[in-house]
Amino acid sequence: MEQFIQLLIYGVQLGVIYALIALGYTMVYGIINLINFAHGDFVMIGAFTAFFTVNLAGVGFFPAILAAMLFPAVLSILIERLAYRPLRDKPRLSALITAIGVSIFLENFPRMIPFIGPNFRRFPELIPMRHFYLLGNASINTIQITNIAASSVLLVFLIFLVQCTKVGRAMRAVAYNKDAAALMGVDVNRIISITFFIGAALAGAGGVLYSLTYPMIDVLMGVWLGTKAFIAAVFGGIGSIPGAVLGGLLMGIIEVFATAVYSELGYGSGFVVLILVLLFRPSGLLGKAPLDKV
């Protein structure tokens, strides 16, 4: 029982990070039906933003995570405006290839910057480590509590924004039908930019939380995290915010328990989940199958 509880804590801690990143995938897809493969790189940008903010300004956790959310969010608006918006009415393959190109650029351009480079860097310790014992030897530490608490706060804020604000109603209207929303006076371009902003901000926060847990960062860290978060979004039902959260939590728990069975099994568990979902429930756990309009 103690080992089960301990593994469950590790799985939830990892799962909430996957969920934060997966939310960006699912929100952008829900609005413009685009798989933004550059989204995972905002995780890396957020982690490095926090790294330099802490080392240069000497700030603590809260200013660091705010900076890590703001910079990728602003950058995402610029990318959406320059790279994605001109292709919005083009074939989807054009936007997909552009997203891959943007991702490759974001992964390799920082490697040429002297003060970043390709090497690993140790992330600063922003949260003092302390353990709290729950049952026998099963414990939860301050970093795990921070991950779960920060992710929960951001998730509650997102749900409030989407369900209870004018911007959220506009986002849902654009997701349902862009043309009808435009006819009703909704600024579609503005809502799409806001969606990119929020998704990248959540990814940046996820980058900081992941770096607290595994304190080594590099320019390619977003590739693997982005892939896992994308699988989580598909698992839960891409386009569904509750689905992204559920998919992220289940992905984290499955990966941790698979790793406990065999150390190398955890790396491939996400892809096994993806294959099974695509075979038996292509719309995901909470996703809705598309309706054929006649």
Image (tube, rainbow, N blue to C red):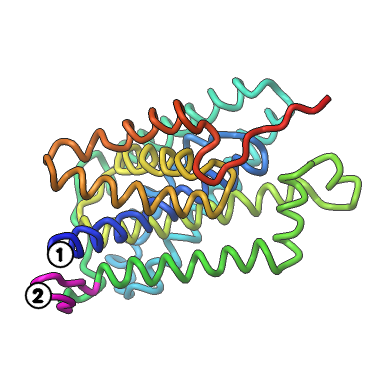
Q: Where residue 163 sits: x, y (%)? A: 68, 64
* Position above or below: 162 against 108: below
* Position above or below: 175 against 134: above
Q: Main secondary structure of the magenta part?
A: strand
Q: Identity of the amino acid at label 1? A: Met
Which structural element holds mark 1?
loop
Nearer to the camera, 109 or 228 = 228
Q: Identity of the amino acid at label 2? A: Gly
Residue under the point 45% across and 26% down? 279
Evaluate if marks 2 and 1 touch, with contact meaning CB atoms under 8 Å apart.
Answer: yes
Report the residue marked by disc 1. Answer: 1
* Position above or below: 189 against 65: above
How many dots with numbers? Answer: 2
Nearer to the camera, 100 or 149 = 149
Select label 2 or label 1 by which is in front: 1
Measure the alpha-carbon separation of dots 2 and 1: 9 Å
Which structural element holds mark 2?
loop
Q: In which quarter of the image is the C terminus?
A: top right
Report the residue marked by disc 2. Answer: 136
The residue segment tinted magenta is: 132-142
Residue under the point 33% across and 74% down? 59
Which is nearer the N-term, disc 2 or disc 1? 1
Residue under the point 75% across and 44% down? 176
Q: Where residue 195 sits: x, y (%)? A: 63, 51
Disc 1: CA contacts within 10 A as few (<14), some (14-19) or many (>=20): few
